Amino acid sequence: MASTRVMAAGTALEPITGATAEELAGRELEAATQEFSNLVVSHRPQIFRFLLASTRDVDLAETLTQECFLKAHRNWGSFRGESSAMTWLMRIAINLQKDHWRNRRMQFWRHTQTNSVELNEASDWLPSGERSAEQQMLAREQVGHVWKAVEGLSERQRTVFLLRFVDERELSEIALATGLSEGTVKAHLSRALGKVRMELKGKR
Amino acid sequence: MSLGMGKMDKMDKRTEEMTDGVLDEALRNFRLSVHAWSEAAYSQPRSAAVVRKVSWRLVAGWALGCVLALGSLAGGVYERHHRQEAARIAAAVQAARQQQMAAEQRAREEDEDLLAKVDKDVSRAVPSAMEPLAQLMAEDETQ
């Protein structure tokens, strides 16, 4: 409506043109904010899940998720859509957890303050499906062994493994999110799977 | 021999397939477990926790400041105590010296008085006529 008036009136309505530009900028900002809000709503659970699996610490995963979206909000303007928003967010999350572990290594006196849950506690979480008690116990045991193997993986192997087998990401997506080549991702996955297989063989 | 190797290969393959079946099942269970945990943790209400980020520089600064303050305080207290002690010792030495000097002075005065009294009571001027006798007595005493 306002823009029609501007076009019709030409140069005589110079101040109104300024106001319209402001309005347009305001609307653009509002739209961007709405878009980012939608992004948060749709992607937050996945980011939280990845960080929870990486850290086994609910509070820490929550904090890192907050930081991830805060960082994403600050850099939302520079996101050009070269990869999917999820891949971009995952990349930020990976860097944040990497920074966190690096800082924790430096702050050696805080090592005892970790809130990570024990492996057996993490293995207790299983969906209540139509399973017998025996199947549930077997599944819990298997999950425990996978957690144990995951704990022994290197940082990169763990990240690649979790992205592939927990988040079910494609290799190309993992490569984009981690900044590695697909070949390197495959190599890391293969080594990680080898360790999980060894752990599962070792239990029998 | 080759037949034996073939059998071994077949057995390995079968074992591998079985292992992969177990692996697939374990990975599936692992994924379901993480999803279940994440959903439960995500949906539970949480009170806002205050994240305190204490910089190691801040901690080191405070520690250094405390050490310096304590050091200065201890140094001041020690210096003050040391000075008081030195003054006390000096005063005691001075008093002792004064007492000693007074005692010496008193003893000297007493000796002088005594000698003066002895001189007054005992000694007399020897008449000139008895001078040779007095000299003889003095020689006898020395012998």
Image (spheres, helix red, strand yellow):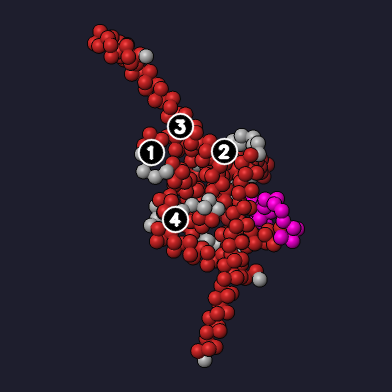
| Residue depicted at 56% across the width and 42% down the height | A45
The amino acid type found where label 2 is placed reads: Val
Q: CA distance from mark 2 to mark 1?
A: 29 Å
Count residues near mark 4 (Cα–Cα under 10 Å), then give few for <14, some for 14-19, many for 20+: some
The image shows residue A66, relative to residue A153, as above or below, that is above
- Residue under label 2, please give it: B51
Q: Which chain is disc 2 placed on?
A: B
Count residues near mark 2 (Cα–Cα under 10 Å), then give few for <14, some for 14-19, many for 20+: few
The amino acid type found where label 4 is placed reads: Leu
Instruction: Indicate the position of residue A94 as horizontal and vertical percent values.
Output: 47, 48
Q: CA distance from mark 3 to mark 1?
A: 13 Å
| Magenta highlight on residue A122 | yes
| Residue depicted at 33% across the width and 16% down the height | A3
In the rendered image, is residue B64 in sight?
no
Q: Do discs 4 and 1 belong to a common subunit?
A: yes
Residue mark closest to the camera, 3 vs 1:
3
Q: CB of mark 3 within 8 Å of CB of mark 1? A: no
On residue A35, the disc is: 3
Query: Which element carries disc 1, helix, strand or loop?
Result: loop
- Which of the 4 image quarters holds residue B74? top right
Q: Which residues are magenta?
A: A114-135
Q: Earlier in the sequence, mark 3 or mark 4?
A: 3
Instruction: Indicate the position of residue B78 as horizontal and vertical percent values.
Output: 57, 41
On residue A79, the disc is: 1
The amino acid type found where label 3 is placed reads: Glu
Q: Do discs 3 and 4 belong to a common subunit?
A: yes
Q: Which chain is disc 4 placed on?
A: A
On residue A171, the disc is: 4
